[in-house]
Image (cartoon, helix red, strand yellow):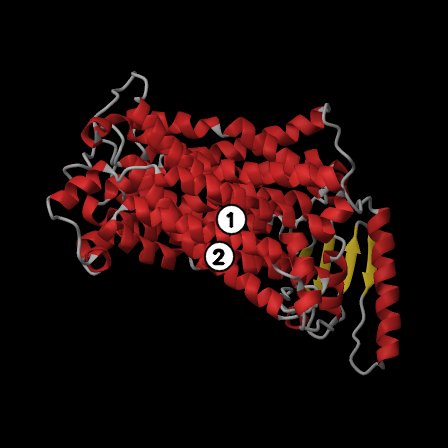
Amino acid sequence: MATTVAIGSKVGQPMTREEKKVIFASSLGTVFEWYDFYLYGTLAVIIGKQFFSNLDPGSQVIFSLLAFAAGFIVRPFGAIFFGRLGDMIGRKYTFLVTILIMGLSTFVVGLLPGYASIGVAAPVILIGLRLLQGLALGGEYGGAATYVAEHSPQHRRGEFTAWIQTTATLGLFLSLLVILGTRTWIGEEAFADWGWRIPFLLSFILLGISVWIRLSMNESPAFKKMKEEGKTSKAPLTESFAQWKNLKIVILALVGLTMGQAVVWYTGQFYALFFLTGALKVDGATANILIAFSLLIGTPFFIVFGKLSDKIGRKPIIMAGCLLGALTYFPLFHALTESANPELAAAQANNRVVVTADPERCSFQFNPTGVAKFTSSCDVAKQALAARSVSYENEAAAAGSVAQVKIGDKIILGFEGKGMTPAEVKAKDDAFKKDIGAAVVAAGYPAKAKAISFMSGQWWMIVAILTVMVIYVTMVYGPIAAMLVELFPTRIRYTSMSLPYHIGNGWFGGLLPATGLAIVAQTGNMYNGLWYPIVFASITFVVGMLFVKETKDVDIYKND
C-alpha cells in the first residue's frame, strides 16, 4: 500500500482515497495545533491585562507580545529534538507526541489564575507553557510536511504539501472565529474578564479529535522503506549540521528561503492585525473580522501556488512573493490607513508633527519592563504624542535646548523637570499634555477610528488591501514545504528541514511584532516598523536568486 500511495495519482488525475486520507489527517491535526498557538497571539492585549497587570497598559501589551515571542524563540530547539526523533524512530509517532504537548499546554492556559490571584507565579507559569508550545510546534511542522511529501507522487508534491501550508492560516482563521463567536455570545465585558478562557478550554476537544485521527495513520513509505533496508541515520544531528555539504544547504535554506518567507507571512497576517488595532485604532472585533475575511478569500491561493510550483518551479514563486512584499508594503499600509481611518490619514497629511530636540537628551522610547523613567523635555514630548498614537518626525536642535513640538502651525514648548519639586513637575507635565491634547484634537487627529459599515466601499477596500498581503503569504508559503523536503535526503530530512524553517519562522518571523513596535517607538513613525520585513525579504530575494537551486524535479526516493 505504501508504494501505491507514493506513486499513486498522476498529474491531471484525482487524488486516490489513501492520498486524501494522508493529507486530511496531517492537515487537520496541524490546523488544531496552529489554532492552539494563535489563540495567544490574537488575545495578546487581554492576556497582558490578566497576567501582567502590575505594569502600565503599554508595557502590558509589549510584555504579552514578548511572552508570545518566547514560544517562537524555542521553536528551533524543538525542531532539533523532535527532528532527531523523527529521523530515528519515524514520522508518525513523533508528531503524535508534539500535538499532545501542544494541546495540553493550551488547555492549562485556560485554567491558569491571573496575576491578581497568584502574583508573579502567573506570568512565570504562562511563559513556561508558551515555551512548551513552541517546542511542540518546532517538531510539528517538519513532521507533517515530511509525512505528506513522502506520500506524494513525484510531480504533484507542491500541490499535496500546499494543503499543509493552509493549516497555519486556517488555524488562525479558526481561532478568530471561536474568539468572535465567544465575544458575541457573552459580551465584551465578560469576555475580557473570564470569557477569553473558553477558546483555550475548547482546545481539549480539538486535541481529542486530532489524537484519534493521527493514531489511525500509517508510517510514511519513504521512511518505512529506508528502515527496512537498515539505512536510517544513527546520528541525524551530526549528519545535518557537522558536515559542511549539508550545513551549507541548511544555511541557504534559512537565508535564501525561510527568513523572507517568515517576515512576509507575519506581516500579512499578524502585523497587519496589530497595525489595525494599535496604530489605526480600529476596534478589536472589527479588525478580527476584516482579517478573517481576507484569510477566507486568500487561503485557496496556497493550493493555486502549490500546484503552479509543480509546473514552473518553487523558487520563482517564493522569490516573487518576497520581492512584491518588499516593494509594496509601504504603499499598502498607507492605503490601509486611508481606508480604515481616513480622519487620521487626513490629519497626518495636513498637519505634520515634528519634535525638535537635542538628540543627546532623547532616550530610547521602548520600556518593556515599565520601570524606566523618561524625564527630559524630549522624552516627555515623545511620550505625550505616543500616548495619542500620533506619528511624528524628529529634527535635531542645538545642544542643551528645550524640546518643542510643532503640530501643523502650532508650536508647544516643552520643559525640563531637573531642579523642580515633584509638585512643580506634575503641574508642568499636566499643562504640557493638556496643550498637546488640545493641539492634536484641533489638528483633526481622532481618538479612535469611526465604525466601518459592512456594506460600505470602505469595508471592502480594507479587505482588498489585506487580501493582497495574504496572497503574498500564499506565494511564499504555498511551495516552501515541498522545496524544503526536496533539499535534503530522507535519512536526515526531518531534522535538516525543520531547523531552518523554525529559525526563519520562529526568530525572524515571531519577533516581528515586538521588534516592529520597538522601531516605531524609537522613530515615532508608525510605518517604520515595516523596515523589518522589507529588509529581510530583500535579503532572501537576493540570496535566493543567486545561490538557491530549483528542486521541483528532485526524486526524493533516490535522494538518500
Where residue 470 appears, as percent x and y from the top left, is: 51, 34
Residue 517 falls in image quadrant: bottom right
Quarter occupied by residue 333: top right
Q: Which residue is drawn at 84% across and 75% down?
A: 425
Nearer to me, 22 or 429:
22
Q: In which quarter of the image is residue 235?
A: bottom left
| Label at residue 117 | none
* Residue 488 shown left or right of residue 329 in the figure: left
Q: Is residue 444 left or right of residue 5?
A: right
Label 2: element kind: helix
Q: Residue at x 77, y 48 (%)?
A: 189
Q: What residue type is labelled 2?
A: Gly
Count of numbered labels shown in the rendering: 2
Q: Name the residue under label 2.
A: 71
- The residue pinned by badge 1 equals 37
Q: Position of residue 402 (x, y in %)?
A: 76, 70
Say whether residue 504 is visible: no
Question: Measuring 76% from the left and 40% from the top, which residue is drawn there?
Answer: 449
Residue 396 appears left or right of 103: right
Q: How crowded is mark 1: few (under 14 residues within 10 Å), some or many (20 or more)?
A: many
Question: Residue lying farthest left?
Answer: 229
Looking at this view, is 264 or 328 the one in front?
264
- Mark 2 touching mark 1, by CB under 8 A? yes
